[in-house]
Amino acid sequence: MKKILEVLQYGDFDIRFNTDIKASETPDIIPDITSRIAIAMSTSLWGGNEREILAIIRALSIADLALSINREEMVSYLDDCSEMLARSFAEARELFEKGGGEVTVFPPHAMPPDIKS
């Protein structure tokens, strides 16, 4: 098991981050992790806590952008990357459905059914 990101708060102002990922040593790992995170976010219900998790992810993103030297360039980069990933996922979904697969979209806070197939 790898720790992708751990964020812990000790007291009111002491927030610490930890990861097992060495992005500076293996930068190619980031696109791979991004894809795996997107798959996890699109295929599981996160135990019904997706609203809270997404709020924290957005808080981290906003804080990162606030500290960015060139915020407009970073926003444009994130927009381009997320658009390419969204297109890739849409194409994969279409191929899956054309092959007979069925995709169910769950709204936020939906809980998995009691009976699993």
Image (cartoon, rainbow, N blue to C red):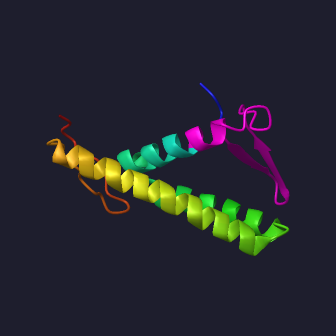
Q: Residue furthest top?
A: 1
* 17 and 115: which is toward the camera: 17
Q: Relative to 106, is 99 above or below?
A: above
Quarter of image, res 79: bottom right
Residue at position x 64%, y 36% from top? Answer: 29
Residue 102: give x, y in percent of width and height.
18, 47
Q: Is residue 112 above or below residue 83?
A: above
Judged left or right of residue 25, residue 89 is left
* Residue drawn at 85 percent across, 68 percent down: 69
The answer, for residue 12, to whether it is visible in the render is yes
The quadrant holding residue 64 is bottom right
Quadrant including the C terminus: top left
Q: Quadrant of the N terminus?
A: top right
Is 8 drawn above or below residue 57 in the view shown?
above
| Looking at the image, residue 23 lies above or below residue 38 | above
**Over which residues does the magenta segment extend?**
4-33
Which one is nearer the viewer's eye here, 44 or 16? 44
- The residue located at (54%, 55%) in the rendering is 53
Question: Which residue is at the far left?
Answer: 100
Outermost residue to the bottom: 72
The answer to whether residue 44 of the structure is visible from this angle is no
User: Is 100 placed left or right of 78 in the picture?
Assistant: left
Q: Is residue 91 left or right of residue 117?
A: right
Quick check: is 6 in the magenta stretch?
Answer: yes
Task: Say how many tags the image has.
Answer: 0
The image position of residue 76, as x and y in percent, is 65, 70
> Residue 92's spot in the image, x, y percent?
33, 47
